[in-house]
Structure formats: C-alpha cells, structure tokens
Image (cartoon, rainbow, N blue to C red):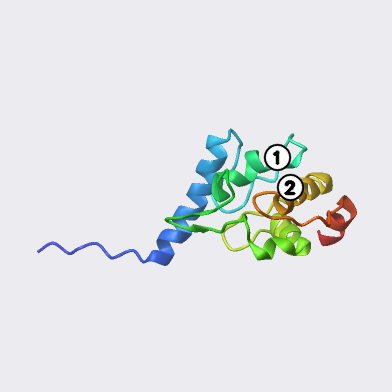
Amino acid sequence: MKIPPPTIGLRLIRQRALPLLCLLGAVVTGLPAQAGTMVNPDTHFSATEGPELYAAICQGCHMPDAKGAQGAGKYPALAGNPRVASAGYVVHNVLHGYHGMPAFADTLDDQQVANVVNYVRSHFGNSDTDLVNPDQVHQAR
C-alpha cells in the first residue's frame, strides 16, 4: 500500500516561495542576492537615483507599475497605497524589511534610501511631496 505524501500547507509554500521569487527578481534584474529573505550584506547597489533603484530592487516583487502581485506570496501594491503617505513607514520597511520583504539597511546608504522612498511616494499615483532626507534615514537606522 502506497502512503500519499503529506500535504504542504499554503503557509509553508509562502515561506518557501517568497524568498525564491525575490531571488528570481534579483536574478532577472542582474543583482546578486542570496536565497532567503535577506539581501546579501556584501552587496551594495551602485544606482543612486530613485527610478534606477526602484527598477533594480523593488520592481522584481512590486512590479514595474508598482501595483504589486499575488501568487505564491503577496507583494503589496505601492501604487495608490495610503500607507505610502507615511514617510517613516516606508523608510522603516526599506531599512528593516517587513514580513517577507528583505531589509536593505546594509546594502543602501542613507541617500539611496531617501531617493527610492521619495520616488515611490511621488510616483505611481502617489502624490506625497514631503521629501525624506538622508538625515531622517540615518536616524531611522
């Protein structure tokens, strides 16, 4: 008698698939990353402007139009997202990660974080005009 394999729960699939999809996004964009939800701390991004940083780092999960995606995991939309209005919320998530999102505190400097946060908060249907500066990012580290 053959015993059927155990059923893999949706939570386990999300735990395994989310890091792999982030890794795939990094591979597609040509960025080195390690498997898992953390970005390799030896990786430092050379892009400095918000649009470049978004394209290199964020769009692999949040999509080029920032509308997010669902599948094996949930990648929230940044486009028109009311949470993006809080600069501190976005800075914290970029620096320290959130749920399956990797942390970028070790791979982006304060100016890069400020630039990508300001880009997301002023594009994709978001119209927040209070800019984040590198000193604020430094204080949030």
> Where residue 51 is drawn, which disc sits there?
1
The residue sitting at the right extreme is: 135
On screen, residue 98 versus residue 25, left or right, reads: right
Percent coordinates x, y for residue 63 in the rendering: 55, 46
User: Which quarter of the picture shows residue 136?
Assistant: bottom right
- Amino acid type at image mark 2: Tyr
From the top left corner, tell me how far across and down residue 19 is, in percent: 52, 52
Quarter occupied by the N terminus: bottom left
Query: Mark 2 Cα within 10 Å, few/some/many (few <14, many 20+)?
Result: many
Q: Residue 54: percent from the left, percent from the top?
A: 67, 43
Q: Position of residue 107 (x, y in %)?
A: 73, 45
Label 1 vs label 2: CA separation? 7 Å
- The quadrant of the picture occupied by the C terminus is bottom right
Any mark on residue 26, and which? none
- The residue wearing badge 2 is 119
Mark 1, Cα crowd under 10 Å, few <14 / some 14-19 / many 20+, is some
Q: Residue at x 63, y 58 (%)?
A: 80
How many dots with numbers?
Answer: 2
Q: Is residue 55 above or below residue 22?
A: above
Is residue 138 visible from the viewing direction of this image? yes
Identify which amino acid the numbered label 1 is placed on.
Pro
Q: Are marks 1 and 2 in contact (CB under 8 Å)?
A: yes
Element at badge 1? helix
Residue at image x 19%, y 63%?
4
SS class, disc 2: helix
Q: Left or right: 39 with respect to 7? A: right
Camera-side residue of 57 and 42 = 57
Q: Earlier in the sequence, mark 1 or mark 2?
A: 1
Eyeballing the image, is 80 above or below 20?
below
